[in-house]
Image: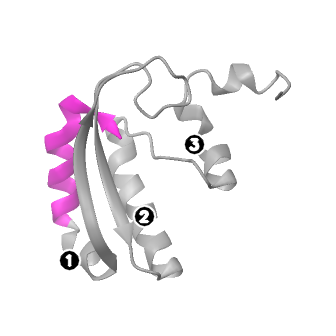
Amino acid sequence: MLPRNQAVAALTRLRAIGDRIDPHLYMSEIRTVAADALWLSSSYGYDCVAIHFTWKREPEACAAITAEIEDLLLPLGARPHWAGDAHALCRLAPLYPRMQASATRPIL
């Protein structure tokens, strides 16, 4: 997910590597999401565009292309979805403004 005002730039960057994405992709979806106040949400604090990828079962190839996509979109303010991946949560925590403050509180 990234700020709506970065959608055109994001799609332009993705089209530039489309030939590397396509062989590993089942489908993709683009949708807009309204800002919310849920601090672990990828749309926390701003209206955004979500670009979703459904990958084929090719873990190594998909991990490589996902890393390339993140490198292209993180500079645009993207917040990758972290659910279900504990390693990603640690790596992406700085992109979620309140994550560090909650790290010192016990999880109930």
Q: Which residues are magenta?
A: 1-16
Contact (Cβ within 8 Å) of mark 3 with mark 2: no
Residue 74 % position (x, y): 39, 44
Which is nearer the N-term, disc 1 or disc 2? 1
- Residue that numbered label 2 is attached to: 66
- Residue that numbered label 3 is attached to: 92
Relative placement, left or right, of 4 versus 61 is left
Q: Within the image, what quadrant is residue 77 found in?
A: top left
SS assignment at label 1: helix
Q: Tell me which residue sits at (34%, 79%) in the image.
A: 24
- Residue that numbered label 1 is attached to: 19
Q: Which amino acid, by three-letter code, is at mark 3?
A: Leu
**SS assignment for the magenta stretch, majority:** helix
How far is mark 3 from mark 1, CA to CA? 27 Å
Which is nearer the N-term, disc 3 or disc 1? 1
Specify whether residue 86 is painted magenta.
no
Seen in the picture, residue 98 relative to 62 is either above or below; the reply is above
